[in-house]
Amino acid sequence: MLALQLVVWLSGCGLGPRSRPAPSTGLRPEARQEPALSGDGRLLASLVERGGRTTVLLQERLSGRVIPLRHLQRQQPHSSPSLSWNGRYLAVIVQRGERRLAVIEDRANGRGIPLPLPGGQEPERLSLAPDGRRLAMQLVRGGQRQVELFDLSGLLEPDLPPGLAVPGR
């Protein structure tokens, strides 16, 4: 308790830890929502308005270079982007007709992977594990919300930090 009081007091005096603004990036100053960083901090996914539709934009954080996404065009509005460790996988909620679906874009092999949900459930939010092998999703069915976890290990290869071995191999 005394340590916490000391930190609070030092912070008020200007002697404690301070947050500093991040160094400048190559990102254009446009309205962004729902930011998601890859685990290594190299990529940023965020939502922007393009032609009146909410669209996920994937960029290299330092250069600002936009990275094209093959399977997400014409499925707007997008929501709830989430990236794996190296940004190989981008999970996002898309609109297909009247339905909202969770989709994962595998940027390494160019696949778009729709995630089927059981009977009448629609995704509201999602969060992809850094290794890409699990997904937490907030679902709605009949006005009721629930959170479910999905095992993607049969669908996706792990996206691990460099030098980390795949368990069991």
Image (cartoon, rainbow, N blue to C red):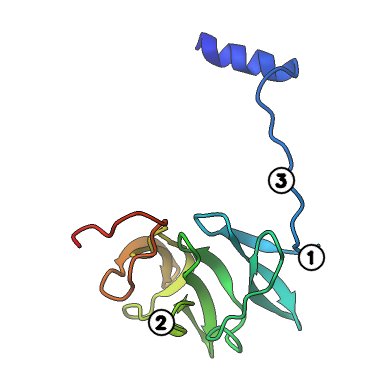
For this rendering, which residue is in front, 131 or 91?
Answer: 131
The residue that appears at 37% across and 54% down in the rendered structure is: 163
C-alpha gap between disc 1 and disc 2: 29 Å
C-alpha gap between disc 3 and disc 1: 15 Å
Q: Amino acid at mark 1?
A: Arg
Where residue 95 sits, quadrant-wise, is bottom right
Whichever of labels 3 and 1 marks the residue nearer the N terminus, that label is 3
> Helix or strand or loop: what does disc 1 sit on?
loop
> Helix or strand or loop: what does disc 2 sit on?
strand
Query: Residue 71: x, y in percent?
Result: 52, 86
> Helix or strand or loop: what does disc 3 sit on?
loop
**What is the residue that sits farthest to the top in this orientation?**
2
Residue behind mark 1: 28
Where residue 58 sits, quadrant-wise, is bottom right
Where, quadrant-wise, is the C terminus in this rendering? Answer: bottom left
Query: Residue 129: x, y in percent?
Result: 40, 59
Q: Which mark is residue 113?
A: 2
Q: Residues within 10 Å of mark 1 (few under 14, many from 20)?
A: few
Q: Amino acid at mark 3?
A: Ala
The residue that appears at 61% across and 82% down in the rendered structure is: 76
Query: Residue 87: x, y in percent?
Result: 50, 66
C-alpha gap between disc 2 and disc 3: 34 Å
The residue that appears at 69% across and 70% down in the rendered structure is: 65
